[in-house]
Image (cartoon, grey):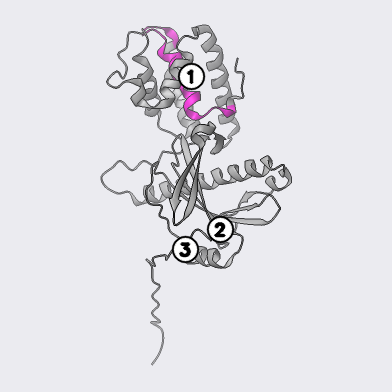
Amino acid sequence: MFVYDIKTLTRFQLTDIVCIYFAKMKKHDGNYRDYPATFKLFSEYYGMKYKGFTNQKDVFDAYFDNGRKGWYQRPLRQQGPHFVESYNKYKDISFAEMKKDVDDIIQFIESEVKQGNTYIPVIADVDEKNKHRFHSYDNYLLEEMKYKIIGKHNREHSLNNRITDYKKVYDLKVSIGEAGEHIVESFEKDRLTNYERKDLADKVKIISNEQQHAGYDVESFTSKGKPLHIEVKSTSKKSIKIMDFYLTDNEYQKFETDPNHVIYYLSGIHSAYVSLFILTKTMLANIEPTPILYKVELDIEKKN
């Protein structure tokens, strides 16, 4: 039924189709009972809470004659642009046609789950009108490149509790960092492929796990084949006015001494869109980093 590859759908586009399908069903439709099992499958695949998908369906419930109130308190446009886009696209599609699409989606996800495939973030271009923005910084124009995210959004480590769970804090930071590295890896592969250097694109890889003292996270190349050592800094913040991040001593020394070193800064991790900024040595030449850690050593075994 799909005229495009299911794998190219964003998480929001794919799950919106299924949520609209169930929202079109009458309250007492026997097939409506299938939605809990479907959303549990989604929860396992995307690493998200089951409740998130039921809430997503409730938004669409309010716009169909199904015997349910749904989430009617806010207009659809205030729920998010993907809700409006999906509703306008599928509201008039026949139930039979939608069932074919939904069956394809569920079959695809079941297959992925059974095979134990990891669904990691990759990027897809947004429309050119909204892809590029430029920010003025120290006589430089800093380009902000925006991309759709197609992949897993691991939000199982939410921090809504008032009492801080430090393991959850740590796990959340790790998931943000890992997502950023996968996005950069995807970006670099696409960039080199677009330069018709697939030979180099195939060599792009994340090294942070296997070479923890390298001082950077991703190995890539310029279009001319020169090595590019990328330190990735990521944040879940969608809108940023001040770009701040931390460098270890090893990362800072690498940035200072390695002529092939560059920093990629990403904002909006775990959301539908991510913004990518490329920070060069020249751009950061006048930055004075703030030391925040000092090492103290006490030799308690030393004899007088």
Circle number at residue 216: 2
Amino acid type indicated by mark 1: Ile
Residue 198 position, x and y percent, is 72, 43
Give the quadrant of the N terminus.
top right
Judge from the rendering whether residue 290 lies leftward or rightward of residue 178; answer left or right: left
Judge from the rendering whether residue 1 lies leftward or rightward of residue 269; answer left or right: right
The residue most toward the front is 139
Residue ID at (51%, 29%): 10
Give the quadrant of the C terminus.
bottom left
Residue annotated with mark 1 = 17
Task: Using the numbered discs, state the Cα–Cα distance from disc 2 to disc 3 in whole angstroms.
Answer: 10 Å
Query: Sequence order check: which comes first, mark 3 or mark 1?
Result: 1
Query: Sequence order check: which comes first, mark 1 or mark 2?
Result: 1
Residue annotated with mark 3 = 248
Residue 190 position, x and y percent, is 63, 40
Q: Which residues are magenta?
A: 7-31
